Amino acid sequence: MKKSILLFLALGLLACQSKEQEKKVLPNVPPEASATSLSPKDSLSQFPKDWEGRYEGEMHWYVNGQLRGKIPCRHEVLAKKPGVWSWTTEFDSSQLIPKAVLKDYLLIEDKSQAQGHYILDEQDGILIDMILMGNSFYSQFEVGNSKITTVDRLEGNTLYKEIIMAPKDKVRKSSAKIGKESFEVTAANSITLQKAILKKQK
């Protein structure tokens, strides 16, 4: 988790560049299919047999809709023992910080929960629930001042990894009233996205 925060901080520094620098964004890349789309063929049986392997590609990061850059990314899912898999991601972030960021995690099936419930063990005391629905894993958690949502989606031999971060102090508040009841909505007005597109290696 500390390494993840370090990478986010590095990305955050880029978001604070001058107005002149903000104009020098990379060209937009073609939009991908929805990260949360489910099709009738999706089933829990896809994991683990279809997921296991090594993947390579690039991670693009965006700040409020603008592409800031891209770095090489690798991901690995390998069986360790029954109900436990390696869940390792490495970012070659040498352009941001002096060395690569390695997330050496374990994915553990939580047999005390309904089918499709897993725990991501960061092996430093941090545990994050990951829910498998169709061909995608979803998680949501908070770290310090940030709310984070992750989506890992497998389509054929392509793995899409998305990390969406929104600072809790950059929000828009609004309210509405229906009859005698009123409610308030707090919406993020600043979002950082890490999106990796990785191909399975033979």
Image: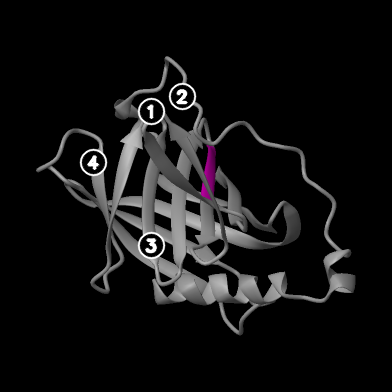
Q: Which mark is residue 38?
A: 2
- The CA distance from mark 1 to mark 3 is 24 Å
- The CA distance from mark 3 to mark 2 is 26 Å
Task: Spot the residue most to the front.
Answer: 180
Give the image's coloring scheme.
one colour
Query: What span is in magenta?
Result: 158-162
Residue 119 at x, y percent in the picture: 25, 52
Q: Residues within 10 Å of mark 4 (few under 14, many from 20)?
A: some
| Amino acid tagged 2 | Leu
- 25 lies above or below 43: below
Going by the image, does 61 lie left or right of 55?
A: right
Q: Tag 2's secondary structure?
A: loop
| Amino acid tagged 1 | Gly
Q: Residues within 10 Å of mark 3 (few under 14, many from 20)?
A: few
Residue 169 at x, y percent in the picture: 52, 67
Looking at the picture, tell me which residue is in the foreground, 36 or 17: 17
What residue do we see at 64% from left, 77% from top?
Answer: 94
Q: Nearer the viewer, mark 4 or mark 3?
A: 3
Can residue 67 be seen here?
Answer: yes
Going by the image, does 165 lie left or right of 86?
A: right
Asked if labels 2 and 3 touch by Cβ distance under 8 angstroms, the answer is: no
- 9 lies above or below 32: below
Looking at the picture, tell me which residue is in the foreground, 112 or 55: 112
Q: Circle 3 sits on which residue?
A: 142
Task: Spot the residue most to the left.
Answer: 112
Q: Where's the N terminus, which quadrant?
A: bottom left
Q: Earlier in the sequence, mark 4 or mark 3?
A: 4
